[in-house]
Image (cartoon, grey):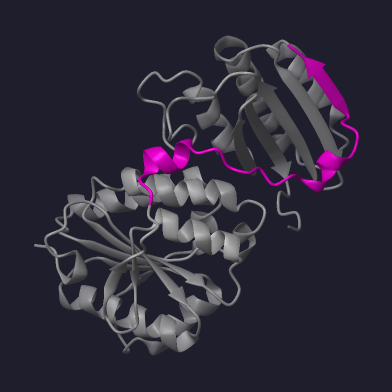
Amino acid sequence: MRTGAAAGHVGYYHEAILHDSDEHLLAVVLPFLLGGIEAGEPTVVGLAGRNAELVRRALPAGTQVAFLPGGDVYARPTAAIRVYRKLLASYVADGARQIRIVGELPPPVLGATFDWWARYESAINHAYDDFPLWSMCAYDTRTTPPRVLAEVTRTHPRVALPDGSHVPTGDYTEPPTYLAEQRLMLPDPVQRTTPTVELTDPTPAEARDAVRAAHRGQLPADDVDDLVVSVSEVVSNALRHGVPPVRMRLWTAADRIVVTVRDGGPGPTDPYAGLLPAGNGAAGGLGLWISHQSCDHVALHRDADGFTIRLTAGNPHFPV
């Protein structure tokens, strides 16, 4: 039997904590964690360093709460989904009737790369819905950009408040609708310079060769190899499933390589493409899945003239 606010709920009970002080955060998190312990439910903390220590010090001595290493969990959205699904499945296999998790994204991802984390926050409403999970995602309103907070209320069905209430956000949008929307792709500053490579209707082999030739030693060899595979897959998808012409552009910077692939089609029909394994035979799903596993950032953009994928290897955290 499920307990707390999620009592009687089937599937994933997904909430945000929009806190403006340490006291606000603790007023929500401590009853959530202690309620899980009292009910005998697996109870997990996936907060970043400072907030993890804040909660650790506030908990009564000997409280049996698991603390996750957040940096590894949130390396990429696909990695986070894989890690959490494995963790949740293990708890269910051990007989858990409900699992409680409070977590937060690390501050660097709340900048230029939040677009794929916004997709993650939306997609997990589906990806975790086959588990009895109650989770809270913490966002500090003092430091989180307003544009990020606007997406948080659209991807979380409800907000947990310090007075113990759990209220609908009012802006929540179901994942298939949210993920299919046209969304701004923040331009990487390097894209304001002349591309190192511009190709029209390249073969996958030509695309792979272009990436290798453009590398100037700024990235580890494994990262370049991953980008080569990702670009090859994305170009293959565009040639096979898109609308010509297919245009590939590549830019290099001291700490990254950025590649865009654009065609005149509408892009993948699967709203979860890239974030979840392509199990339904959707066009282009495998290539996007590979790129989300391999690149340090993947941005998707639809407009009236076509579909663009931007792949980044190296440091994607440019100022915005």
- Residue 56 visible within the image: no
- Residue 162 visible within the image: yes
Q: How many numbered markers are drawn? A: 0
Q: Position of residue 270 (x, y in %)?
A: 42, 28
Quarter of the rendering containing residue 133: bottom left
Residue drawn at the location 50% of the way across and 25% of the way down: 268
In this image, 44 relative to 218: left or right?
left
Quarter of the rendering containing residue 234: top right
Placement of 32 over or under 243, stated as above or below: below
Residue drawn at the location 54% of the way across and 78% of the way down: 50
Q: Quadrant of the C terminus?
A: bottom right
Q: Position of residue 214 (x, y in %)?
A: 86, 29
Q: Position of residue 53 (x, y in %)?
A: 48, 81
Q: Quadrant of the N terminus?
A: bottom left
Residue drawn at the location 37% of the way across and 52% of the way down: 84
In this image, 253 relative to 68: left or right?
right
Q: Position of residue 162 (x, y in %)?
A: 34, 83
Front-most of 299 and 65?
Answer: 299
In this image, 219 relative to 308: left or right?
right
Region in magenta: 173-201
Residue drawn at the location 52% of the way across and 51% of the way down: 117
Q: Is residue 79 magenta?
A: no
Front-most of 36 and 225?
Answer: 36
Q: Is residue 181 magenta?
A: yes
Placement of 223 over or under 38, stated as above or below: above
